[in-house]
């Protein structure tokens, strides 16, 4: 496992979602949006995978993934590479489920506040409310951190 700095942890915690890339059975990359539930200094990241789709299928045969996030305004970002394992709902502890619920509640609250203030014209519905209950989560052990900030801007 690769330890993560406080700056990287805070950066990922601020993201509404991240891009998780896996490899399908034909060797092609597949990218999907996932929500971070928890992230720690040891290099463990807990991701919600709400839809039991292509990412889950890919991980059954190839557990290697990358997790990418960027802030276009600040021109910084990271790609975390590692190995994922699938944790079924029955194996999730109450703290992890509560962390996911808190994350969804926070996202929904932010969307409502932005809509009320008229800051951003958002989705006409509230997509977070429509997410299915988690059937499983992905636990990624980070083995490499790639700083996406161009060298001349560091």
Image (cartoon, rainbow, N blue to C red):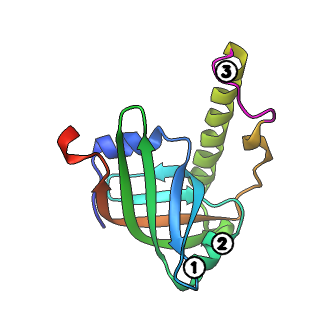
Q: Give how far apart the Cα atoms at labels 2 and 1 are.
A: 8 Å
- Residue that sits furthest to the top in the current view: 117
Q: x and y percent of residue 56 in the render?
A: 63, 73
Q: Give how far apart the Cα atoms at labels 1 and 3 are.
A: 39 Å
Residue contact between numbered discs 2 and 3, judged by CB atoms under 8 Å = no
Q: Which residues are magenta?
A: 118-125
Q: Which residue is mark 3?
A: 113
Q: Which residue is mark 1?
A: 24
Quadrant assignment, res 67? bottom left
Quadrant containing the N terminus is: bottom left
Q: Which residue is mark 2?
A: 54
Q: x and y percent of residue 99 in the render?
A: 58, 46
Q: Few, some or many C-alpha atoms within 10 Å of disc 2 (few <14, some 14-19, many ≥20)?
A: some
User: Is label 1 in a helix, a strand or a loop?
Assistant: loop
> Residue drawn 48% across and 71% down?
84
Count of all numbered marks drawn on residues in the image: 3
Nearer the observer, disc 2 or disc 3?
A: 2
User: Is label 3 in a helix, a strand or a loop?
Assistant: helix
| Magenta segment includes 120 | yes
> Residue drawn 57% across and 72% down?
86
Nearer the observer, disc 1 or disc 3?
A: 1
Compare residues 128 and 95 and report the one nearer the observer.
128
Q: Give how far apart the Cα atoms at labels 2 and 3 are.
A: 33 Å
- Is 53 situated above or below 145? below
> Residue drawn 63% across and 52% down?
97
> Residue drawn 65% across and 23% down?
120
């Amino acid at each position: 496992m690769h330890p993560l700095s406080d700056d990287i942890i805070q950066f990922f915690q601020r993201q509404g979602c991240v891009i998780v890339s896996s490899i399908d059975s034909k060797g092609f990359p597949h990218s999907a949006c996932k929500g971070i539930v928890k992230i720690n200094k040891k290099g463990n990241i807990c991701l919600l995978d709400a839809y039991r789709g292509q990412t889950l299928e890919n991980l059954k045969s190839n557990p290697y993934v990358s997790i990418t996030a960027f802030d276009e305004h600040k021109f910084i970002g990271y790609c975390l590479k590692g190995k994922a394992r699938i944790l079924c709902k029955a194996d999730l502890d109450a703290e992890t489920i509560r962390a996911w619920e808190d994350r969804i509640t926070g996202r929904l609250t932010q969307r409502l506040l932005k809509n009320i203030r008229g800051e951003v014209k958002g989705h006409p519905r509230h997509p977070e409310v429509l997410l299915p209950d988690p059937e499983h989560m992905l636990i990624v052990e980070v083995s490499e951190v790639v700083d996406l900030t161009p060298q001349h801007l560091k």
